[in-house]
Image (cartoon, coloured by chain):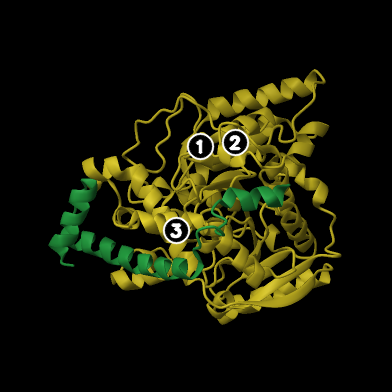
Chain colours: A green, B yellow
Amino acid sequence: MSEDEAAALLRDTNGVTIDGAEAKAAVTLAKTVSATIAAGADARMTLDETPWSYDTLRAGAGA
Amino acid sequence: MSADLHLLGVVEAAEAVASGDVTAEALARAALDRLSTLGPRFNAVVAIEEERALEGARAVDAARARGAPLGPLAGVPMAHKDLYYRAGRPNAGGSIIRADFVPQETSVALERLDAAGALDLGRLHLAEFALSPTGYNVHLGHGRNPWSLDHCSGGSSSGSGAAVSGRLVAASLGSDTGGSIRHPAAMCGITGLKPTHGLVPMAGAMPLSPTLDTLGPLARSARDAARILSVIGGADARDGSTLAAPKRNYEDALTGDLDGVTIAVPAGYYRDAATPDILDLMDESIAALRSAGARIIETRVDDMALVNAMMQLVMGVEAAALHRRWLQERPQDYGAQVRARILPGLAYPATRYAEALMLRAKIAQEWLAAAMGAADMVHIPTLAVPVPTIAETTEGEPADVAAAIGKVTHCTRGINYLGLPSLSLPCGLAENSLPAAFQLVGRPFGEAVLLRAGDAYQRVSDHHRRMPPGC
């Protein structure tokens, strides 16, 4: 993604207008982090067994 | 005694006031003097509130004179990171964007401290919008470390760390979203407690990332931190995340020994990043904990990439949501490092954010199984490298600066995603003669055993008593 494309993405989706280089750095980082999370989720996410609430874990510990 | 009043910690000060050995007003005046003389040197202070402090002190002294019961923090001089709201008092959160903000409510934490008799002497420095692990703030200037003014104080609770370390106040409240209590505690040589997410109500404190934000004390000892946590912890309807939070007296847990307590020391990710001098200090602290009665076991954590990514995404998305309007209208009013930390939050897919939240409990359970096993807590460095200089984290090639900052958060940020409590304890001086620290990480709501271990450690060591040169 070019700097102009990254800047356009942030402008169009969030209304934030910033320098192209800064936008590209942000989008690049977001892509890298997202890829890590997607891989982690692929290995763990199930429809029925995901203990989706952190509050549940914490409440269990506090009980 | 008057010349040494600044040396009194939280429990000592409260006991001295209760016994009549010293007045709250004398304690307040001693702290106000140090805040005004040493505070600027460390760039620790945003505003001193002498009138409020003396009024509160006189109220404590009057209560004692008439035989009224005193709270557990009566007369204790404190000041807090400038993100705790007090109705009618300006609160800028380290920014210029919020320079004119005057909250209409007082935070739950400050209300509880007030009710316990603590004195609020003013507002302390923090990183802009609480978004820097080093104390970076282009508007207020960088926080400075009392041990060496050229070195980072740690952030984002930079003023809290410097003020407690320099003996300007007995203790201070900070906040911790990715290490912001533990960084300044470690870098300034004091004790810092990041509670379980949902133990201390966040209502009335400026948010950064509500899923990760926690409030807790920076103090001179684990015992002092225990007393403060006993006051500020517990459920409040204004913060629904605290509804399962217990209310207890954490000092009751401080038995002085660690008989029956098991501490896990994970090999891999944390210790592999430590420099040799830090590793030596880690091992010395483990030996001291063993001498206090703890059983030490070895576990293993190889990789924190997923946990760290989850933390980075959650903080980025939530911060971006909170700041989007200002990013639209006033992007130039953010410091460059701060804006760079928020902007990626605008670019994450919503599905990734949902996955990060939905998998939080599962991943926390995975980490607990690997790092802690059957133990009661985990021992890891707080800071795996010696305290960096301010120049190392602000000047030079962007990649080098990013790497230096990344090392600061290596051992801390993931713990916030996991939501776990962590107690940072000073454990000596690194090769650069600045403080080093380890953290004890517990299970959800496991603060009592962490504080017990911290207190036992501080009974067989004296690192927490060391003061910066000239203080």
Please tell me the numbered disc located at residue B109. 2
Indicate which disc, 3 or 2, sits on the residue closer to the N terminus: 2
- On the image, which quarter does residue B301 sit in? bottom right
Q: Which residue is at the front of the view, B342 or B306?
A: B306
Q: Are marks 3 and 2 on the same chain?
A: yes
Q: Which residue is at the front of the view, B161 or A56?
A: A56
Residue B159: percent from left, percent from top: 50, 48
**Real-space Cα separation, disc 1 to disc 3, in angstroms:** 31 Å
Front position among marks 1 and 3: 3
Q: Secondary structure at mark 1?
A: loop
Q: Is residue B17 above or below residue B168?
A: above
Please tell me the numbered disc located at residue B355. 3
For the point 65% across and 37% down, the residue is: B235
Q: Is residue B425 above or below residue B248?
A: below
Please tell me the numbered disc located at residue B84. 1
Q: Are marks 2 and 1 on the same chain?
A: yes
Q: Disc 2 is attached to a residue of which chain?
A: B
Disc tally is 3
Answer left or right for B380 relative to A26: right
**What amino acid does circle 3 point to?**
Glu
